[in-house]
Amino acid sequence: MKAYKIIVLAKQVPDTRNVGKDAMKADGTVNRAALAAIFNPEDLNALEQALRIKDQYPGTTVKILTMGPGRAADVIREGLYRGADGGILLTDRAFAGSDTLATSYALGQALKKIGDVDIIIAGRQAIDGDTAQVGPQVAEKLGLLQVTYVEEVVELKGKSIVMKRRLDRGVETVKCQLPLVMTVNGSAPDCRARNAKSLMMFKRARTVTELQKENEDYTMLYNDRPELNIPEWTVNDIETDASQLGLTGSPTKVKSIENVVLQAKDSKVISAADAQIENMMIELLESHTIG
Amino acid sequence: MNNIFVYCEIEEGQVAEVSLELLTKGRSLADELNCKLEAIAVGHKLNDVPKQVIPYGVDTLYLADDKRLYPYQTLPHTSIVVKLFEEQKPQIAFMGASSIGRDLGPRVSSALHSGLTADCTSLVIGDHYDKKADKNYENLLYQIRPAFGGNIIATIINPDCRPQMATVREGVMKKEIRDIKYKGKIIQLEVPKYVSDEDFVVEIIERHMEKSKLNIKGAPIVVAGGYGVGSKENFQLLHDLAEVLGGEVGASRAAVDSGYAGHDRQIGQTGLTVRPKLYIACGISGQIQHRAGMEQSAQIIAINTDPEAPINAIADYVITGDIAEIIPKMIKYYKKNTK
């Protein structure tokens, strides 16, 4: 085999690493508008692994599959700018409220429709939930092997692949056969930057919904340049069992959400003045906390 | 009877700490639910496992012993756990939120179509009334964890699917032997009935495991830094203070993400949980995920330029100022008063 068909699973996530003070509304709900939507960081590591395989085996195709609201098309465009060949946006209200299992089911059904994928690559986990569940669950839904926490593809030859995995307390090198689902660790190499050529080529890539909103007639452009059309799949485009979708298909339910209220301790507030610091150190020594 | 199951991780014949912690939690929940605590260990040469786990109050220990089952591999371990759960129908199942548990748990939950909640910080039993269905559920497992950047704490339930599955990080639950002479039953599983040869598709070419050189979990004093430390160079101040006081250096996730400290020093919900005598938080704002990993420290000092930092609320000493000024003074006055 000289070329591979690769799908990268990517998610658009709120940038929870930079949560500001306005992230919560007064009523205790999350103010999504105050959080930037970004390409999930470890999914970028995953994309890089896919692009490296493409570098090595020209003719390999790398496409992004993402599930989310309309604006998640940004993730596909970002992938295109960095070297992906295309993408599919899976979007429908029927998917709303999905937990990891219902998400994996929908992604799995979309992957079945895509068909004959050699390697499915995803980031280990998304920063909005940190569950690391969707990769393994997609693999199970498709009856494929999963190899988690991959840091490096050491060798790929025909259907045989060797990968280095990063574990809690060590590293492991494993060898197995394609097809498989691989999840990539944040310790893997960072994703390459956008390249100018791809940016020029794909900056007008749009979903049909986006085109309709922009209210411009790009029909000619898209007839001539079909690569600019980002396919949008709804629940009607994939074969699904409604009982496994969205909130209904999610075994886990959110019973309650509490805003975090701090139980304030009786703190001693001190300054950086020498006498105060010395006094604190003496107290800690006297109570045998230190020393 | 629908019991509580704990999947025990094995490394070189030793049961992982996190598994023993989960057995301790499982035992207390089993008492509350008046059911049994069961455990499963999958691996090779498991002769020493019973004496390690049964004292934690394990009523039944299932062993799947075969040389192909160690080290851990996804498919064979999944097959065994799934088949055993189908036979025994546990109401609750726990795994460590470790490299192994986070690989196995989702696979098992998908195969059984049961819900799984990752990285729980608290597990309690409670009831639930579903208004829409006008249905009352008794004795569900509340799976409690911070979510969404730590701004909220979510209680997750699995009303209809079994088992109710959860993973928990090492160090979150306390480890406590129930009775050194506890009587538990040991059942050896007939491995070929639980796995097929097709499950063994991965060849482990090389495996290099090392015990962490750091002992942050066991350190009496932890000096931890956050994003507010500002640079890797400034982090050296924390190392200086830790060395003088005889402690270890920890870090918040933001500091690790910024490259100020290694991943193995991360404290919080997705890192280590520590309970030292003294926790010195430097330039850490104190999001809930971080606090989840340190709030049980006996004493807390918070050093921050922001007088409104959330960490101050749980601190015994709040120092508003620059660590570059304050840490050298702490070292100086420690030395002066210990001479």
Image: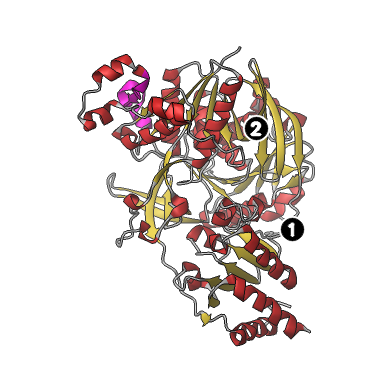
Q: Which region of the structure is painted magenta?
A: A227-244
Say which quadrant the C terminus of chain B sits in.
bottom right
Element on which disc 2 rests: strand
Q: Are labels 2 and 1 on one chain?
A: no
Residue B80 left/right relative to A40: right
Q: Is residue A289 above or below residue A83?
A: below
- Name the residue carrying label 2: A152
Element on which disc 1 rests: loop
Query: The disc numbered 2 marks a residue on which chain?
Result: A
Residue B180 got which mark? 1
Q: How many marks?
A: 2
Q: Which amino acid type corresponds to the residue marked 1 in the rendered image?
A: Ile
Residue A103 pos. (x, y %): 42, 34
Residue B5 got which mark? none
Residue A106 pos. (x, y %): 40, 29
Q: Is residue A231 magenta?
A: yes
Which residue sits at x=50%, y=46%?
A130
